[in-house]
Amino acid sequence: MLDKGETQELINIVDTANDCMDARGIPEYSLLAVQWNDEIDRWEVVYYSDYGIDYTTVFVQQLSRGHYMATGETGGSDWGLGCH
């Protein structure tokens, strides 16, 4: 269960990752998972899409309280790291 603050943090993380997906021109996608990766100290936001790349992971880093930046993504050879 998430409290109000945790819920807002999750919304900010997903919004940041959605902006990255939109910037890449993916017209439709579905959110599959959001998880913390201890090894790289980043959030992983995983999507599915029928448009070109099936599964895409957007990595999101917290810059400061409530401010996040997508720091890269994986999903195919035509996607470069560094979605900002």
Image: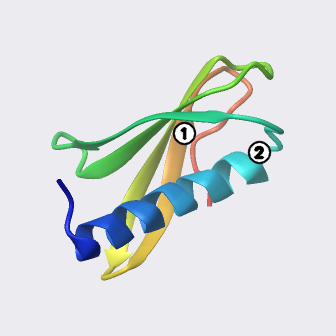
Nearer to me, 12 or 25: 12
- Marks 2/1 in contact by CB < 8 Å: the verdict is yes
Q: Residues within 10 Å of mark 1 (few under 14, many from 20)?
A: many
Is residue 83 visible to the viewer in this orientation of the structure?
A: no
Is residue 47 visible to the viewer in this orientation of the structure?
A: yes
The amino acid pointed to by label 2 is Arg
Q: How many marks?
A: 2
Q: Name the residue beneath numbered marker 2.
A: 24
Which quarter of the image is occupied by the C terminus? bottom right
What residue appears at the point 79 percent right and 19 percent down from the top-left corner? Answer: 52
What residue appears at the point 42 percent right and 55 percent down from the top-left corner? Answer: 60
Relative to 74, 42 lies left or right: left
Query: Residue 15 appears in which quarter of the rendering?
Result: bottom right
Residue 2 image offset from top left, x and y in percent = 21, 60
Q: Name the residue beneath numbered marker 1.
A: 73
The amino acid pointed to by label 1 is Glu
Residue 64 image offset from top left, x and y in percent = 33, 81
Residue 3 image offset from top left, x and y in percent = 20, 68
Query: Residue 51 appears in which quarter of the rendering?
Result: top right
